[in-house]
């Protein structure tokens, strides 16, 4: 589950050819996700995430959970839903 976007700024200092020190900053954008398997929150850099997947339309799994096992369990649930009739009285 997508939670929010965080922006961080890091300050660095470098020395020029003439010996004077200059400060410069680098901006970094992070996405905060909540694992759909175990419920923990985790961070991913924006550069490593496809912008389309930074929504709640997709499932997100933390690095500590088994992604293949989670995907198989979701597939089983969806297969059960899609095999029901439209006139079924069962709740989802």
Image: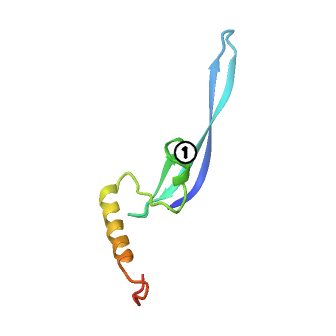
> 60 or 5: nearer the eye?
60
The residue indicated by pointer 1 is 46
Q: Is residue 74 above or below residue 5?
A: below
Q: Nearer the viewer, residue 39 or 23?
A: 39
Residue 64 visible within the image: yes
Closer to the camera in the image, 88 or 7: 88
Residue appearing at x 53%, y 62% in the figure? 56
Classed neighbour count for the residue bearing mark 1: other residues with Cα under 10 Å, few (<14), some (14–19), many (≥20)? some
Is 6 on the left or on the right of 68, as rendered? right
Asked which secondary structure carries label 1, the reply is helix
**Figure quadrant of the C terminus:** bottom left
Identify the residue at image location x=51%, y=54%. Answer: 53
Is residue 3 shown above or below 78?
Answer: above
Question: Is residue 46 placed above or below 4 in the rendered structure?
Answer: above
**Vertical placement of 47 versus 6: above or below?**
above
Q: Residue furthest top?
A: 18
The quarter holding residue 78 reads: bottom left
Instruction: Decide if residue 66 is in sight here.
Output: no
> How many dots with numbers?
1
How far from the left and from the top, in percent, is residue 6? 60, 50
**Residue 71's image quarter?**
bottom left
């Amino acid at each position: 589950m997508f939670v929010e976007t965080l922006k961080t700024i890091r300050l660095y200092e470098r020395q020029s050819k003439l010996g004077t020190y200059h400060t410069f900053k680098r901006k970094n954008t992070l996405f905060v996700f909540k694992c759909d398997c175990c419920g923990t929150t985790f961070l991913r850099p924006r550069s490593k995430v496809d912008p389309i997947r930074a929504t709640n339309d997709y499932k997100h799994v933390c690095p500590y959970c088994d992604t293949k096992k989670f995907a198989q369990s979701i597939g089983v649930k969806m297969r059960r839903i899609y095999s029901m009739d439209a006139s079924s009285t069962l709740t989802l």
